[in-house]
Amino acid sequence: METTYNPKVLAFLCRWCSYNGADLAGSMRIQYPPNIRIILVPCTGRVDILFLLKAFELGADTVFVSGCHEGDCHYVSGNLFAAKRVARAKKILAEIGIEPERLEMFHVSASEGPKFAAVCQEMTDRAYKLGPNPARNVVKAA
């Protein structure tokens, strides 16, 4: 039986910038892959390493965090904390045998709808290139 791979892409988006960028992409009718699942956070500084790792444990193929541009965070430095957490999570993923390329941090402002769509396409393309998350089957079997 042949199954078609349909990647799961999870996005943690800052309420102030990236979420509005996603909204602008929709208003501009810019198409991006339909397999993006968005989690709205007040600030990317709120995204904990455990949230990122749990996303992979639950079967996400790629995950990205997207917030305000550096220096423009509505909470002063939340996006800088998030970038450090993403970098640390990537190291942890590599240590446990999951490709760190499955996780990324982006900076998309409210006026960058086309950039948001490009980020979604990039992360979906990565998921297709890397294939299914190796942890996906482990969790289902347990």
Image: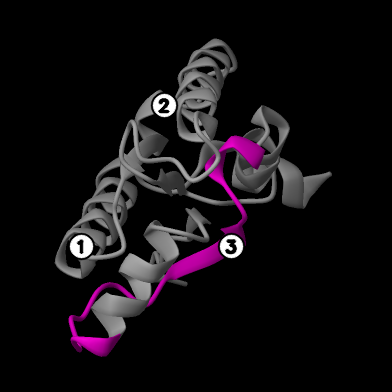
- Earlier sequence position, callout 3 versus callout 1: 3
Q: Residue 86, how many percent across, how many down? A: 49, 27
88 sits left or right of 5 in the view: right
Residue bearing the label numbered 2: 99
The CA span between labels 1 and 2 is: 28 Å
Disc ID at residue 40: 3
**Foreground disc of the pair 2, 3:** 3
Asked whether, in this view, residue 120 is left or right of residue 65, the answer is left
The disc label shown at residue 132, or none:
none
Q: In this view, does 85 lie above or below 17?
A: above
The image shows residue 97, relative to residue 72, as above or below, that is above
Q: Residue at x 55, y 40 (%)?
A: 75
From the viewer's perspective, is 100 left or right of 117? right
Q: Residues within 10 Å of mark 2 (few under 14, many from 20)?
A: some
Image quadrant occupied by the C terminus:
top right
As drawn, the label of residue 112 is 1
Q: Specify few, some or many for label 1: CA neighbours under 10 Å numbering under 14, 14-19, or 20 or more.
A: some
- Magenta highlight range: 27-47
Q: Distance between the residues labelled 3 and 1?
A: 17 Å
Q: Label 1, secondary structure: give it.
A: loop
Whether residue 26 is in magenta: the answer is: no
